[in-house]
Image (spheres, rainbow, N blue to C red):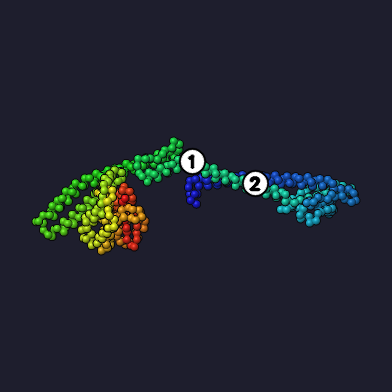
Amino acid sequence: MKALRGLRGQLALAFAVVFGLVVGLAGFYQYRQVGRVLHQGNELRLRARAEALLGRVEVSGAVPVVPLPVRGEQMRVVVEATGQPARELFHSPGFGMLAAEKETDTLSVVEVQQAATDYAGRSVQVRLWLAHSAAPLLADLGRVRLGLWGALAGSLALAAALAAGLGWLVLRPLRRISRQARRIGAAPGPERLPVPATGDEVQELAQALNKMLDRLQAGAELQDNFLAAAAHELRTPLAVLQTGLAVTRQSPELPANLRPALAAQSQELQRLGRLVEDFLLVSRLRSDALPLTRRPVPLDELVLAAADQLGPRFRAAGRPLDLSIDEAVPDYTVPGDADKLTTVIINLLDNALRHAPPGAAVHVAVGREAATGLFYAEVSNPIHTSLGDLSRLTTARYQADVLSGGAGLGLWLSNRIAELHGAPLALREADGRLYVRLRLQ
């Protein structure tokens, strides 16, 4: 059924239906014409035979002379005189008046007659009915039907083959456009669809799609440029606010009752600063302009620093943060961009903090996979219900819980940065927890 839903399948079906109707109607007409010719030929042969037999009937003598039919023939001869009842001279066994008066499915019947003079000198009418089996005629018609059915089947097969070949040839530009569209969809860029010089609807479609891609790319570039410009413009006032707030909090003259409020504002400014950095990363990732400064990075120390940075937020939210580092691994140094990897770890911790139930512990594990030899940093947190398709979590602006806050960019950004370092994030569910693993060589 899937093949019939495609253009080639629909084209083959249309060809088959049209050819089938045309050949079927033509075959029906030919069958009727051939049947009429065969019936006429059969009747002419039978009538010629009947007239030959009638010519050999003699009624002029005292004893009439009637020729006998050959095997396969049935005959009846009657003499009729004016004012006298008809006198039957001969009839074949089982071939009576009823059989002689009509043609049946198994018999072909003709009637001939001629005037004659009997032995008494009276004018009489001699009538002769001759019949023979209709089996040869039916056999000929059966062979004609079989041939027409074979022609119909062959026509349908030829129509399907022609439709498949024609569909392959006609749809070849569309297949090229489709393949190119999939490549562009997988990796958006300046590449455009091929425009066949056919001067038909396919060429118009390719040109229209290319114009649409140009508009989409221009809109995306405009959005990314605006996002990058806005992020750059926001970094300076945020830095000024953070510095001023830090100076104010260090003042010995600050009343004690204002310190908790200023601490909360400082945390919000830090969160806003990370969000601005995320927006800047988004614009760079979409434009493939995000540089990586690869240097040897101690993964365990990087995770410890990120945990220390977010530790006060975990304590304020009442969610324990458990850290486990496999001490059997002698060295956790990996090549990577320390700033970008720190962003990944902080995003993973922040995501776990926002989605973990109150009082639930968030686990962070650092180690090395025995099977692949890759170093990893894994963050896990309890979840209320199964998240279903985990690949959705790494799409831009997807939020598993729309009430949790955030822009839905953390896991997407983290996954893109992880891909730039060689491997995407590995997500899995087990025992009511979500595990997100960053893997590095």
Q: Secondary structure at mark 1?
A: helix
Q: At which x and y percent is residue 50?
A: 79, 47
* Residue at figure coordinates x 62%, y 47% from the top left: 150
Residue 391 shown left or right of residue 53 in the figure: left
**Nearest the camera: 209 or 108?**
209
Q: Secondary structure at mark 2?
A: helix
* Residue at figure coordinates x 75%, y 45% from the top left: 44
User: Mark 2 near mark 1, Cβ–Cβ under 8 Å?
Assistant: no
Q: Residue furthest bottom?
A: 359
Q: At which x and y percent is residue 16?
A: 55, 46
Would you place residue 114 above or below residue 385 in this image? Answer: above
Which residue has dot 2 on it?
A: 147
Residue 392 shown left or right of residue 316 in the figure: right
Q: Residue 361 bears which disc, if any?
A: none
Which residue has dot 1 on it?
A: 170
Q: At which x and y percent is residue 333?
A: 27, 51
Q: Earlier in the sequence, mark 2 or mark 1?
A: 2
Q: At which x and y percent is residue 144?
A: 66, 47
Q: Residue furthest left?
A: 253
Q: Is residue 192 in sight in this rendering?
A: yes
Q: Amino acid at mark 2?
A: Gly
Tell me how far mark 2 sits from mark 1, CA to CA. Answer: 33 Å
Residue 301 shown left or right of residue 120 in the figure: left
* Residue at figure coordinates x 27%, y 58% from the top left: 327
How many discs appear?
A: 2
Q: Residues within 10 Å of mark 2 (few under 14, many from 20)?
A: some
* Residue at figure coordinates x 21%, y 53% from the top left: 270
Q: Amino acid at mark 1?
A: Val
Residue 351 shown left or right of residue 244 in the figure: right
Q: Is residue 404 in sight in this rendering?
A: no
Q: Residues within 10 Å of mark 1 (few under 14, many from 20)?
A: some
